[in-house]
Image: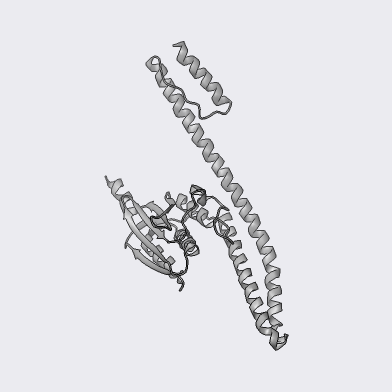
Amino acid sequence: MSRPLAELASAFERVAAGELSTRVTPSGASELKLLGASFNTMTGRLEAARDSLKQAERVAAWREVARRLAHEFKNILTPMSLSLHRVASRAAAVAPEERAAVHESLGLLERGVDQLAQLAEQFSQYARLPDPHFETLDLAEVAKAAATMHEREEVELTVEVASALLVRGDSLLLSRAAHNLLLNAYEASPRGARIELRTFAAGDRAVLEVLDRGPGVPESLGERVFEPYVSTKKRSSGLGLSLVRDIATQHQGTVTLENRPGGGACARLALPRLEAAAAQGEA
């Protein structure tokens, strides 16, 4: 009896010192085995709670950074936009032979300001992700609505959706998630490539997939692609996939990004399917 008790006493000391990964091998009399198993359960829960707290602290810190960046971006963009407007209003006064070059330069500046405004909006969205307002939605309709916002001549988009794929969700947040997945695919795709958007039922899940033929996910990133400010693209905030992950979590769902055979990536958003949940409740 003394040996398992001594092991437990030593284990408690390690836990008190912060080693929450500590586990014991239950042994001895049945009561001592039960005590050892309970200790392992307790430390497992403590470790999970600590990891959750660390993740929550990281997310809070990332959101604060995003809030400050959005504020600074907007402070800079307001005078830039006003100055650009004043310069554009005086373009007619430029010598005729210089006007083409001036208009070209103004166009480049306007596109640059627009890109900065889009980045500021992404930072702002991430900093103040709202609480979801749940209602019954058809994920297929969410996908089709998102597809209409992405019509670009240089890339072909095909849509294949199952009808009446019901979920409990926030229409604004799920639309934002679908939009970000499509935008990520467009930015990764070369000219002339094809993007596939599809929805389907998979067991108790309603799935929205976006497939592209871009460069795929670098092995060095792995799951880090969902962390804020991690991106493989230039001029990107690295917040698009982080927003999708947070929205999926709010809806008790998951999101994954995997490489496809033959090149490209498959982004998969999976949510609890309403029909499946109702069937389980009846059972």
Outermost left residue: 283
Front residue of this view, candidates 20 and 279: 20
Residue 161 spot, x, y in % from top left = 34, 63
Residue 90 spot, x, y in % from top left = 71, 82
Relative height, residue 55 to residue 148 (above, below): above
Front residue of this view, candidates 4 and 142: 4
Residue 156 spot, x, y in % from top left = 41, 69
Residue 251 spot, x, y in % from top left = 44, 51
Identify the image quadrant of the N terminus. top left
Which residue is depicted at the point 57% across and 25% down? 16
The answer to which quarter of the image holds residue 208 is bottom left
Across the whole image, how many numbered discs are drawn on residues?
0
Relative height, residue 132 to residue 141 (above, below): above
Is residue 138 visible in the rendered image? The answer is: no
Front residue of this view, candidates 90 and 49: 90
> Viewed as shown, does residue 249 lie left or right of 158?
right
The answer to which quarter of the image holds residue 196 is bottom left
Which residue is depicted at the point 61% across and 55% down? 66
Colour setting: one colour
Is residue 144 visible in the rendered image? The answer is: yes
Relative height, residue 163 to residue 223 (above, below): below
Outermost bottom residue: 96
Identify the image quadrant of the C terminus. top left
Which residue is depicted at the point 49% across and 19% down? 8
> Viewed as shown, does residue 128 lie left or right of 179?
right
> Viewed as shown, does residue 249 lie left or right of 236?
left
